[in-house]
């Protein structure tokens, strides 16, 4: 197996990587911008309890109640 090539211009490479994941530079096209995009605070979060999975049409007709910090949403499916 061949050895990995030594980075001749390691500082240039590091600067490029930093910009690729930066929250400040090129956020419209870098990795962070593509993964997370623009964000805004949550205004309202509501939920309802169910012991089983439901089709969407049934779920949207349930009695939703406002969620509070610390509420448990049950097991993951």
Image: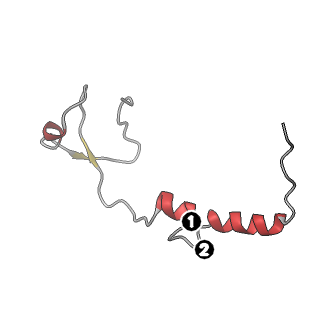
**Residue 62: percent from the left, percent from the top?**
15, 40
Q: Report which residue position mark 2 lands on.
A: 25
Q: Is residue 44 above or below residue 11?
A: above
* Residue in the image at 39% along x and 63% along y: 41
Crowding at mark 2 (Cα within 10 Å: few <14, some 14-19, many 20+): some
Q: Secondary structure at mark 2?
A: loop
Q: Tell me if label 2 and label 1 are in contact, CB under 8 Å.
A: yes
Nearer the observer, 58 or 22? 22
Q: Quadrant of residue 20?
A: bottom right
* Residue in the image at 83% along x and 47% along y: 4
Q: Is residue 20 left or right of residue 68?
A: right
Query: Which residue is farthest bottom?
Result: 25
Q: Is residue 27 left or right of residue 67?
A: right
Residue 73 - label:
none
**Residue 35: percent from the left, percent from the top?**
49, 57
Quarter containing the C terminus: top left
Q: Quadrant of residue 14?
A: bottom right
Q: Is residue 29 left or right of residue 18?
A: left
Query: Which residue is farthest top?
Result: 51
Crowding at mark 1 (Cα within 10 Å: few <14, some 14-19, many 20+): some
Mark 2 or 1, closer to the camera: 1
Which colour assignment does the render follow? secondary structure
Q: Secondary structure at mark 1?
A: loop
Nearer the observer, 32 or 61? 32
Q: Is residue 66 above or below residue 41?
A: above
* Residue in the image at 59% along x and 73% along y: 24
Q: Earlier in the sequence, mark 2 or mark 1?
A: 2
Q: Report which residue position mark 1 lands on.
A: 30
């Amino acid at each position: 197996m061949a050895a990995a090539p030594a980075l001749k211009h390691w500082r240039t490479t590091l600067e490029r990587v930093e910009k690729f994941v930066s929250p400040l530079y090129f956020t419209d096209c870098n990795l962070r911008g593509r993964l997370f995009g623009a964000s805004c605070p949550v205004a309202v979060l509501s939920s309802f309890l169910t012991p089983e999975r439901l089709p969407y049409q049934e779920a949207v007709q349930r009695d939703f109640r406002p969620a509070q910090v610390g509420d448990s949403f049950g097991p993951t499916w």
